[in-house]
Image (cartoon, rainbow, N blue to C red):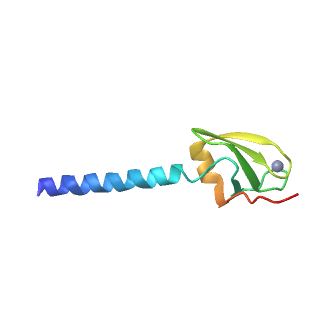
Amino acid sequence: MARFNIEALAMSLNSQLTWRIGKLQKFSVGDVIRTRKNHPCGGNLWEVLRTGVDFRIKCKKCGRVLLLPRPKFEKSVKEVLKQVQKPD
Ligand SMILES: [Zn+2]
């Protein structure tokens, strides 16, 4: 019985870890994200300039750059839009 419980726990931890890794790879440089709250300038679209422990994002509307710790960044993201290459 005890061994079964330990195995179940290990499996549960393993799936959580996989889920976390999946989440870590969700954002990449060049992605455009939409935030839950608008920037004071009125925009809510941001370009990801840097990923890692901290995220550097640039407001698409006013060009302001912010540096956010990952947990804060992840909480504020509403939607990820992969960058579309437009010929111009
Ligand atoms: Zn802005």
Image point (65%, 60%), residue name: 78
Q: In the rendered image, which quarter is residue 37 located in?
A: bottom right
Among the 4 quarters of the image, the one containing residue 7: bottom left
Answer with left or right where residue 61 lies relative to residue 21.
right
Kindly identify the residue that appears in the image at 74 percent across and 60 percent down.
84
Furthest-left residue in this view: 1
Residue 68 or 50: which is nearer the viewer?
Answer: 50
Report whether 58 appears left or right of 17: right
- Depth check: 2 or 82 in front? 82
Q: Is residue 69 left or right of residue 5?
A: right
Count all numbered tags in the image, as a single digit: 0
Residue at 67%, 46% (x, y): give it. 29
Image position, residue 15 (x, y; %): 36, 56
Q: Percent x, y for residue 81?
A: 69, 60
Locate residue 42: give its quadrant: bottom right
In the displayed structure, does residue 1 sit left or right of residue 71?
left
* Quarter of the rendering occupied by the C terminus: bottom right
Quarter of the image with the N terminus is: bottom left
Q: Residue 59: x, y in percent?
A: 79, 49
Residue at the far right in the pictured view: 88
